[in-house]
Amino acid sequence: MTTSEIPEDVRGILAYPLDFAVDEIPSDPIWFSTQPVTELVPLAGEGTGGLYAMLAASGEILFVDSEGSGGIIASSLTALLELILSHPYWQDLLKFSGGGDLAEMRRTASFAATDYYACYPEAAAACQRMSKRLGISTPGDPIGLLHKSVSESPQRLRLFAPDGSELESLFKRFTVDSNHTWSDKGR
């Protein structure tokens, strides 16, 4: 699948509330560099200035946020759409991963899902409709696949800012217990 094959009405839902804006690829040149040097194909923008790009040689999907973090998040565009449609709050899984702990990511999922669907109650039904329309199924372990992609990313591709400093991992050190609204609920 390519982004050009995504129907117009699906593009709108992917852009909002799922924050994968195929029609809003940042027009600025790619501001980071890769090692090894690889051709990147911009796929979509993200509301805070992030960029989704495909590694031309492998088809893997890279995400770089506006805060200076990045990494490979999926093996293909289809795998990315599977992730977005099954866990539209996927960025929170990384943010509250305890530095890349898969068990903490799994623990985060129910809290992040509850918050996400409270803010975007229409998203659950929209994701189901889009999955059917695109013929996308949920992989057996989307959280495990995300963890594997981000964990292995630095060994395959390093990302650098214009000043030469390496971009941070998408894994952040927060945990469920770092979010007082989640930890107070005691789920």
Image (tube, grey):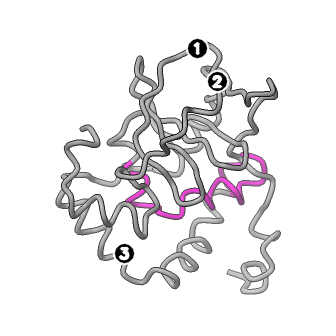
Task: State the SS at label 1.
Answer: loop
Give the mark nearer the N terminus: 1 vs 3. Answer: 1
Q: Residue 133: which disc?
A: none
Picture residue at 62% right of the left edge, 58% below the top: 93
Q: Nearer the viewer, residue 114 or 102?
A: 114
Residue at 74% across, 68% down = 176
Quadrant of the image containing the N terminus: top left
Disc 1 versus disc 2: distance between alpha carbons? 7 Å
Looking at the rendering, the stretch of residues picked out in magenta corresponds to 81-104
Q: Which mark is residue 124?
A: 3
Where's the C terminus, which quadrant? Answer: bottom right
Residue 33, numbered circle: 2
- Kind of residue indicated by mark 1: Val
Residue 96 % position (x, y) = 71, 60
Query: Disc 1 marks which residue?
Result: 37
Residue located at (47% from left, 26% from top): 40
Q: CA distance from mark 1 to mark 3?
A: 39 Å
Residue 183 sits inside the magenta stretch: no
Is 80 situated above or below 96? above
Q: Is residue 107 left or right of residue 85?
A: right
Amino acid tagged 3: Ala
- Tell me residue 5's x, y (percent): 19, 44
